[in-house]
Image: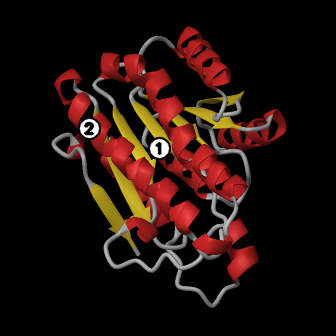
Amino acid sequence: MPPTRVAVITGIGKPGQAGEVIARTLAERGARIVAVGRTRDEVDARVADLHAAGHEALGFACDLTDEVQVAQLASDVTSTVGTRVDTLVNVAGGFAMSGPVGESTLATWHTQFAINATTAYLATRAFLPSLRAANGAIVYFAAAAVLPGAKLIAMSAYGAAKSAVVALMRAVAEEERANGVRANAIAPTAIRTAANMASMGDKVRYVEREDVATIVAWLCSDAARAITGQLIRLG
């Protein structure tokens, strides 16, 4: 029998977000889930949910903006599950309005790049050796805000950070093609998460978490083995 696929999913801590549905979907398709979140309590809760549903999962707490912690995370994961990682899904990120550029702050700019771009960069760099061993797949979370024609009024920091994520994806796709690693990104409009519902209400047209998870699972599957370097709009 082939080895059980290992899927590392970042940004899985908080309930009601996309990460927990992505984890459940990949687990239902036979993956062993490595859940990564910022706090131990949140990660343990998500892992407990997966265990209760009969899935195999383990969790790690990590500040994904910290180079040392991310390197230790990759070492701990590989020492626990082996040197193969089949899937890395970079869900970790966040949104904040920065206001017009002329009135924005450097602190918001730095924060948006840290939580969206730096997290994806450090996780990718740390897990590439394990992904190469498995001819693995990486999925990045961009946003519809980076697509042509998007109106980035008062959210330049977020748009710039997500554009950096897309550039990272394209670089990885080209650099790792010869190593058998694929990299793609999704660009959803607002996802129906607990946080978005709380801030924007129920009058917004949302992308459902389940639809996001279905596309992510497909991009990670053998059915998408010929696809790399692509940015896919959702919504």
Secondary structure state at the residue bearing disc 1: helix
Quadrant of image for the N terminus: top left
Query: Looking at the image, which residue is at 49% across and 11% down?
Result: 82
Query: Looking at the image, which residue is at 56% across and 62% down?
Result: 158
Query: Looking at the image, which residue is at 67% across and 29% down?
Result: 66
Q: Classify mark 1: residues with Cα within 10 Å, few (<14), some (14-19) or many (20+).
A: many
Quadrant of image for the C terminus: bottom left
Secondary structure state at the residue bearing disc 2: helix
Q: How is the image coloured?
A: secondary structure
Judging by the rendered image, the residue that carries numbered circle 1 is: 26
Q: Amino acid at mark 2?
A: Ala
Which residue is nearer to you in this view: 164 or 181? 164
Q: Is residue 51 left or right of residue 22?
A: right
Measured Cα–Cα span from mark 1 to mark 2? 22 Å
Q: Earlier in the sequence, mark 1 or mark 2?
A: 1
Residue 88 location, quadrant? top left
Query: Looking at the image, which residue is at 32% across and 20% down?
Result: 132
Q: Is residue 32 visible?
A: no
Q: Is residue 96 left or right of residue 168?
A: right
Q: Amino acid at mark 1?
A: Leu
Residue 12 location, quadrant? top right
Q: Position of residue 23 (x, y in %)?
A: 55, 45
Q: Classify mark 2: residues with Cα within 10 Å, few (<14), some (14-19) or many (20+).
A: many
Q: Position of residue 46 (x, y in %)?
A: 71, 43
Q: Nearer the viewer, mark 1 or mark 2?
A: 2
Q: Position of residue 72 (x, y in %)?
A: 63, 16
Farthest residue, direction top: 79
Residue 74 location, quadrant? top right
Residue 7, compared with residue 83, is above or below; it is: below
Residue 173, numbered circle:
2
Q: Position of residue 137 (x, y in %)?
A: 34, 36
